[in-house]
Image (tube, helix red, strand yellow):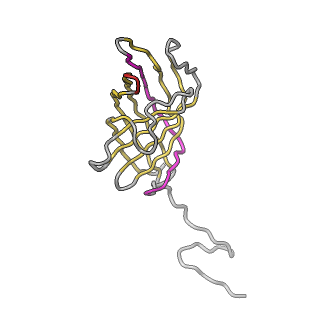
Amino acid sequence: MTLLLLAGTGVVSGRLSAAPVAAKQTTIRFTVVENGRNKLPGGQVLVTRASGSGTLTLADTPQSNAVNTSTSATGTIRFHGWRVVGQRVIDDANLSMNVVSGTYRFTNRIQNVNLQTTVTESDPGEKFKCSVGSAGRATLLHGKVKRQPDSFATGDFCGLHVLDFGGTVGAPAHVVVTIKQGTP
């Protein structure tokens, strides 16, 4: 019988055991403020306001160029959008959304926070009816270089796609993303 001893691994009775390694949990904090005014076809103007903040918790250290999925999320996003047609103002949407989950991605140029939301308040007098409990999405982009400004986009709630221009472009906004690592 040959007994192999491995230094530092804790060989006991022929079984390997390793000391537990503490995971590095990461908290992503985000805030957004958006005040937009965009020209639409037919002489219409889309006016939007959005604000909110929250956190995404990741199980580990986020990896560059990868979609890092949250293990938990908190926060609220308020959104109000309306169209101006001539002298008339048409309310399109006015709602609050709770953040229920999300992803975080970063490169050397951007930090992208893609939030899955649930509508918690909705004004029934708006053009787009959006019942409480409806799922939605909000995307925050924090540009790290001058060529890529901060932006905010919404989409997929109640069939309404506002400020969802595709890619990493949305309405100009002020977005702050901070990262804190720690052991749970």
**Left or right of 28, for residue 8:** right
Counting from the top left corner in percent of width and height, residue 72 is at 53, 41
Q: Report the front residue among 171 and 33.
A: 171
Q: Tell me residue 177's x, y (percent).
A: 36, 43
Q: Residue at x 46, y 41 (%)?
A: 166
- Predominant secondary structure in magenta? strand
Q: Relative to 14, does residue 137 appear above or below in the rendering?
A: above
Where residue 40 sits, quadrant-wise, is top left
The answer to which quarter of the image holds residue 167 is: top left
Q: Residue furthest right?
A: 1
- Residue 181 placement (x, y as % from top left): 41, 50
Residue at image location 43% in from the left, 25% down from the top? 79
Instruction: Please provide the residue range marked out in magenta.
Output: 64-85
Q: x%, y% of residue 8?
A: 53, 74
Residue furthest to the front in view is 42
- Most extreme residue toward the left, as rendered? 146
